[in-house]
Structures are given as C-alpha cells and as structure tokens.
C-alpha cells in the first residue's frame, strides 16, 4: 500500500508510527526459509543474506510488509543502506553483514498460515503481527502510538528523524494502491525523481543533475495529456485556459509556470536541478549511464546534456515553488528499487 501526505493531527481513529528511511520490501516466510522482494519484485535475500536468519524469529508462515533499514546510532541511515544496495560481490556483501548490517522492520502482516488478512482492520493485523514476530536485531515490529499525532511528530522533529505515518485503525490493506487511510507526515519533504540530464563544471566534472517527475504516477495524470503538444514540445500549464482539472493542481500552482514535456508517449514535469549532496559514487554511476543512454529531450536548458529518464534519485527539499521547481534541494541518493 502506498502513502498520501498530510499535516500533523490528533485523532482517536488513527495510530502513528515512525516513517522509516529505508527500502520498502515484502518478506515471505514459508515455515522454513525467508524470501524478501522489493517493489520491482526483485529477490533481495542474496544481497542482504543476514535476513535469512529472521526465520528463527517468526512463529508462523506469513507475508510481512515493511522496510529494510541500516542504522547509525539507532537512527535509520539511508546513505549506509545505499552502499549496501550497490554491493554485488559475495565477499564484499559478507563483510558488509558485519560492518553495515540491515534489519527488516515489519509494520503490517498480509497473510498468516493460509489466511489472507488484507480485509481485516489494521488494528487487528497489528495484534496478529505482535503474536507472530519476535523482535531481534534482524527483524522487528514497527512500534506505534494512538491518538497523539502532533506530539509524536514534534518529538520526531526534535530527534532529527524523517517524520511519521498516520494510519486509520479500521483500514484495510489496498495492494499496490495509494490511499488516504495511510498518511505520511514529513519533517522535510522528499520525493523520488527521474534524472533526465546533467551539467558539467569548468573542470568537466558533473556539477548538478536535472530532475523530472513522472506524471503518470501522480494525481495530475488525468489532465496533463490535454496540455502536451502533439509534437512533443514543452508546454506551460499557465498558458492553457483554466478548468476544473487545473484546479485539482491548485490552479496550476496559482498560475505559475509548470513545464510539462512529452517524451516517447509519456508526460513529465520538469522539476529543476540539484547540485548539493551528490556523492562521487552517484556521479560516477550517472555519467556511466549517460554514456550508454543519451537522449534528445524537448527541454531548452543551456549547457545541459540529456539522458534517458530511467535512473531514480531521492531528493530532500523545503517546498515546491510556484513554477513547480524544488526549493533548497539536496540529493539524498540513487534508488535501485524503482
């Protein structure tokens, strides 16, 4: 199940738990062994072999929804997790089990024995999860509080954590769908964007990367096609007459200028660029990808080199400007599960 966004609130109808800075995954336990798959349905157990040991701490065959995390000083550490995600050599992975161990944090249970639970209320699923999983350093359950969302969010902010998630106690589990019954409440905004190009500095080194939002995966997909020219050129939403669908996007950001492009039959929103936070490792991966996947995108950006919009990067930012660009963006890292 996917998340919508919200502001902090209190409600007796919701539980609140930490928003983890990890890799979304589903764990399958058949009573003997464990398998773990990401959102792309890739098998991850050989990349994170320590999770095999989770079988000793699960009491019944089940399917668990959760996240794989690495921690530093007890807090989720995305950069450390990213380093693990890049490892492919079996010997290096073995070493990393000791130096950068991962943990699976379960926050939902979708099936136990042969009983499917997705139509059970969340609070019942949480009770079943409590009985099935024994907390240890390999696998644990996501803890939650009831009602006091505002205070919990304030504490999260004070501790420098990413945010919280609010979930209706009576909610069902909607497979692969985004629903308002689960709400993410973030201290800082972050999102995943497609990398569509880059610029170089005077020394010929990668300086910043250009970002796109895939509109087929957003709430504006239903009206974008009307604003993309048939020849695939850029088009400004602000130049199109206002109608109800534009109002769904807050009057096109109060009549700001959202740059929409069409490329190979798909619609994208140009989100600007980010320069801060790009690691040398990520720069090398982006440039290697660029050499093999150049592209001719319908964007007019001086000094830019364009690539196929396939690499995914996570960016932290303060807010979106009226033009749809990101304010004070910082590159968090490449993702390889999307």
Image (cartoon, rainbow, N blue to C red):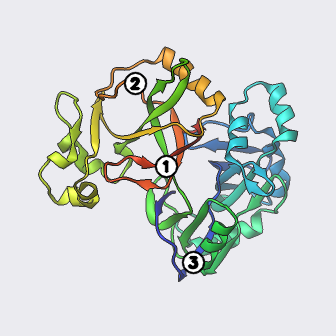
Tag nearer the camera, 3 or 2: 2
**Which tag, 3 or 2, sits closer to the chain's start?**
3
**Foreground of the two, 168 or 240:** 240
**Sequence-earlier tag: 2 or 1:** 2
Residue found at x 14% / y 47% = 240
Report helix, strand or loop for mark 1: loop
Disc 3 element: helix
Determine which residue is flagged by label 3: 150
Q: Residue 47 at what x, y percent from top left?
A: 73, 34
Q: Residues within 10 Å of mark 1 (few under 14, many from 20)?
A: some
Q: Give the percent coordinates (x, y) of residue 162.
A: 62, 59
View extreme (top): residue: 291
Residue displayed at 77% across by 24% down: 89
Question: What residue do we see at 77% from left, 60% from top?
Answer: 140
Towards the viewer: 84 or 133: 84
Discs 2, 1 touching: Cβ within 8 Å? no
Examine the image and state in which quarter residue 166 appears: bottom right
Q: Is residue 23 above or below residue 228?
A: below
Q: Is residue 128 left or right of residue 207?
A: right
* Circle 3 residues within 10 Å: few <14, some 14–19, many ≥20: some
Residue, disc 2: 304
In front: label 1 or label 3:
1
Q: Which mark is residue 328?
A: 1
- 80 left or right of 12? right
Give SS at disc 2: loop
Residue at (54, 25) in percent of width and height: 206
Lateral position of residue 304 relative to residue 81, left or right: left
* Mark 2 to mark 1 CA distance (whole Å): 20 Å
């Amino acid at each position: 199940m996917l998340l919508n966004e919200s502001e902090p609130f209190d409600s007796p109808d919701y539980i609140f738990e930490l928003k983890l800075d990890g890799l979304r995954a589903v764990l399958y336990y058949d009573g003997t062994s464990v398998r773990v798959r990401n959102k792309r349905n890739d098998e991850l157990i050989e990349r994170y072999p320590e999770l095999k040991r989770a079988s000793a701490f699960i009491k019944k065959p089940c399917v668990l929804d959760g996240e794989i995390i690495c921690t530093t000083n007890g807090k989720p550490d995305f950069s450390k997790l990213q380093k693990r995600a890049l490892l492919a050599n079996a010997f290096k992975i073995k070493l990393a089990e000791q130096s950068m161990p991962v943990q699976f944090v379960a926050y939902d249970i979708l099936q136990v024995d042969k009983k499917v639970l997705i139509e059970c209320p969340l609070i019942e699923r949480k009770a079943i999860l409590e009985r099935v999983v024994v907390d240890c350093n390999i696998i644990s359950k996501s803890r939650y509080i009831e009602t006091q969302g505002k205070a919990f969010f304030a504490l999260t902010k004070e501790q420098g954590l990413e945010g919280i998630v609010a979930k209706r106690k009576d909610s069902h589990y909607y497979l692969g769908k985004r629903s308002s019954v689960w709400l993410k409440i973030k201290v800082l905004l972050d999102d995943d964007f497609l990398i569509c190009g880059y610029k170089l500095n005077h020394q010929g080194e990668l300086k910043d990367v250009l970002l796109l939002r895939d509109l087929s995966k957003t709430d504006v997909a239903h009206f974008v096609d009307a604003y993309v020219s048939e020849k695939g050129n850029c088009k400004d939403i602000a130049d199109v007459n206002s109608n109800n669908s534009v109002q769904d996007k807050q009057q096109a950001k109060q009549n700001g200028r959202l740059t929409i492009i069409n490329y190979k039959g798909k619609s994208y929103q140009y989100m600007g660029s980010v320069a801060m936070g790009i690691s040398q490792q990520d720069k090398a991966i982006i440039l290697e990808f660029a050499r093999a996947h150049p592209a001719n995108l319908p964007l007019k950006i001086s000094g830019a080199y364009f690539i196929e919009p396939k690499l995914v990067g996570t960016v932290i930012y303060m807010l979106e400007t009226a033009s749809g660009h990101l304010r004070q963006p910082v590159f968090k890292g490449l993702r390889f599960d999307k």
